Image (cartoon, grey):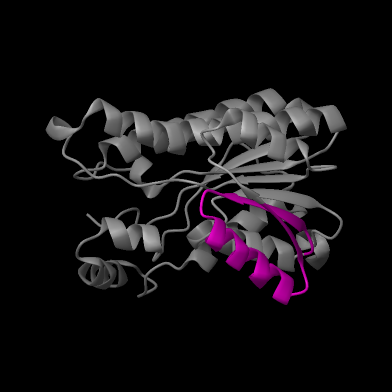
Amino acid sequence: MAVDAYDLTGRTAFVTGAASGIGRAGAVLLARAGATVHCADLDAPGLDETAALIGAGGGTAVTHHLDVTDRARLGQAVMSCEQLHIMAAVAGIMHSSPVLETRDEDLDRVLDVNFKGVLYACQEAARLMVAQGTRGSIVTMASGAVDTGGPGLLCYGVAKAAVVQLTRTLATEVGPHGIRVNAVAPGWIRTAMTGRHEAGQARTEALMARRSPLGRVGEPEDVAHTILYLASDASAFVTGQILRPNGGVAMPW
């Protein structure tokens, strides 16, 4: 495999959830690899910070302030790309509640963002790629939660399991068009989102570091490199797969 298989010069990527965490790290790394990156998020100040980081590195960023649950607005943003080669559907939220205390509105909100938001991004990207004849790559964001149960994570785990099924199904449908679809299922990664979810974040980090053969916790950049691999020609014969950057530990419980 040539080293330049990771070169994305001349390609356009669209990243949801780009204002922070894994989405920001992914957007910045894709730009460093040469892609023009369209960054989408509901957090406008965070989007500006991501765009500034990309610009400081000599890259090109276009920002879209939107909610991924708004299919029409997301579709307009995706269609604004002159040509689309990469979709990284990273946007997501976390919610924790015991099964017996889970409310309809809790489940609806998590499914809306973590599944429907990914579905909409995949649909819009695939339609555009097919219309343009682009041999593109779609990367979705699942979670280590799909591999094991965890207290309080019914809504999150169900939504991420749906993303896995979406990924595998879509890969079979758009493969004939030369479009690859893969998911990333990280273990516990140190982000603002996991920090808000984990009341005992320091304890969780210590536990993860002890359980991991690598002796440390995950960082957004660890997942970003997996996104780059799946977005690039380095993974040209990889589709319908679930990659797990988790330090050897699926989840902390």
Q: Is residue 1 visible?
A: no
Q: Is residue 137 visible?
A: yes
Task: Estimate the x, y position of residue 86 in percent, counting from the top left.
Answer: 72, 46
Q: Say if 248 sits above or below 77 in the image.
A: below
Which residue: 25% across, 67% down? Answer: 201
Task: Estimate the x, y position of residue 250 in percent, counting from the top left.
Answer: 35, 53
The residue stretch that appears in magenta: 34-63
- In the image: residue 215, left or right of residue 223: left
Which residue: 28% across, 70% down? Answer: 205
Quarter of the image where one finds residue 127: top right
- In the image: residue 9, left or right of residue 139: right
Q: Is residue 35 magenta?
A: yes
Which residue occupies the extreme left position in the image?
100
Q: Say if 100 sits above or below 87 in the image.
A: above
Nearer-the-camera pick, 203 or 44? 44
Q: Is residue 139 magenta?
A: no
- In the image: residue 252, left or right of residue 48: left
Task: Estimate the x, y position of residue 215 in percent, counting from the top left.
Answer: 35, 75
Q: Say if 189 sits above or below 202 in the image.
A: above
- In the image: residue 79, left or right of residue 252: right
Which residue: 26% across, 26% down? Answer: 104
> In which quadrant of the rendered image does the N terminus lie?
bottom right
Q: Say if 214 sits above or below 240 in the image.
A: below
